[in-house]
Image (cartoon, rainbow, N blue to C red):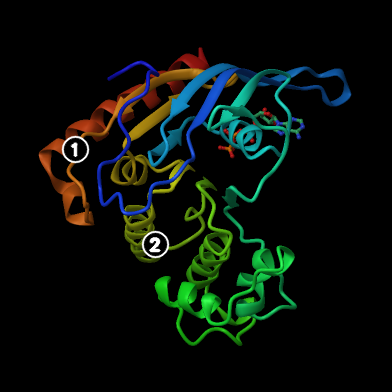
Amino acid sequence: MTDNTQIAPNETDAATERDGSIHVESVSKVYDPDGEHVVAVDDVTLHIDAGEFVTVLGPSGCGKSTLLECIAGFTDPTSGNVYVDGEIIDGPSAERGVVFQSNRLLPWMTIEENVDIGPKMRGAVEDGRASQLLERMGLEGTENAYPSELSGGMQQRAEIARLLANDPDIMLMDEPFSALDALTKEMLQEMLLEVWDDDNRTVLFITHDVEEALFLADRVLVMTAGPGRVKEIVDVDLERPRDLSMTTTEEFTALKDRVLHLIHEEAREAME
Ligand SMILES: Nc1ncnc2c1ncn2[C@@H]1O[C@H](COP(=O)(O)OP(=O)(O)OP(=O)(O)O)[C@@H](O)[C@H]1O
């Protein structure tokens, strides 16, 4: 276990040198619906190096999505700041792509048109680029389909292709695979790791699934039950590249036991 100090970024194929470091400095977020004063995130400080893959686990309602929204720039922290590559953020940006549990594909557009939305807004559509990205996500031939004609897993892959079309340095993923069946989820986890391995983007990935958190991450941030604070940050020193067979190894099982212990401890404390 470590505290929240930084560690070296992944040392996989560094063909593409990218920016994308995230620094969360003493961020708190208080919601005040009808004077209720809900502290969603409480004084979180966290540094993520460019190219690092960090997953976030914690009890329901502990502020994981709120933390991600602060980093995405969708909401302002009540206090504290989020820095990307040393600059305070002041709103959303194409450099920070976001994927949610339910995709935001526009149902009246074809898959290709959906993937091209970002480039089109920037006036930078490249012929064939959407097809390339779709092929990369195993979706060749779906260009002219509409989102409703694709399965849930295919829609999430198209959503990731759409995000990649903006070439963001940072991918913020809020339970992107949690609505999918187990096999589809595993396939997407491996696909995401391949994309990450190739591109060196920074990933912050929220999940409720301990195995998913460990399989993907360089580090796992475990949050406390609300108000959300950093409970512990667990280093995942497992070899890369990874495939799902490693989830049965002793090393993986030991890490899983440690993280489950932290989560159960938190759940018990929250109930007392
Ligand atoms: N826009 C909002 N207005 C008021 N309260 C909010 C708002 N968004 C979140 N909250 C509250 O803040 C707390 C943290 O919510 P958040 O969605 O960030 O948690 P979470 O850990 O992502 O939950 P889950 O795992 O269930 O998705 C909860 O008490 C929630 O009700």
Residue 253's disc is: 1
Judge whether residue 232 can be spotted in this image. Answer: yes
Residue at image position (52%, 66%) is 161
Q: Nearer the viewer, mark 1 or mark 2?
A: 2
Q: List x then y, in percent, for residue 86.
A: 55, 27
37 relative position to 17: left or right: right
Question: Which secondary structure, mark 1?
Answer: helix
Identify residue type, mark 2. Answer: Leu
Q: List x then y, in percent, for residue 235.
A: 28, 28
Residue at image position (34%, 64%) is 187
Mark 1–mark 2 distance (CA, rounded to whole Å) = 21 Å
Residue at image position (39%, 57%) is 192
Q: Within 10 angstroms of label 2, few (less than 14), some, or many (20 or more) residues?
A: many
Identify residue type, mark 1. Answer: Thr
Upstream in the sequence, badge 1 or badge 2? 2
Q: Nearer the viewer, residue 52 or 37?
A: 52
Q: Which residue is mark 2?
A: 188
C-beta proximity under 8 Å, tags 1 and 2? no
Question: Which secondary structure, mark 2?
Answer: helix
Q: Nearer the viewer, residue 53 or 55?
A: 53
Q: Within 10 angstroms of label 1, few (less than 14), some, or many (20 or more) residues?
A: some
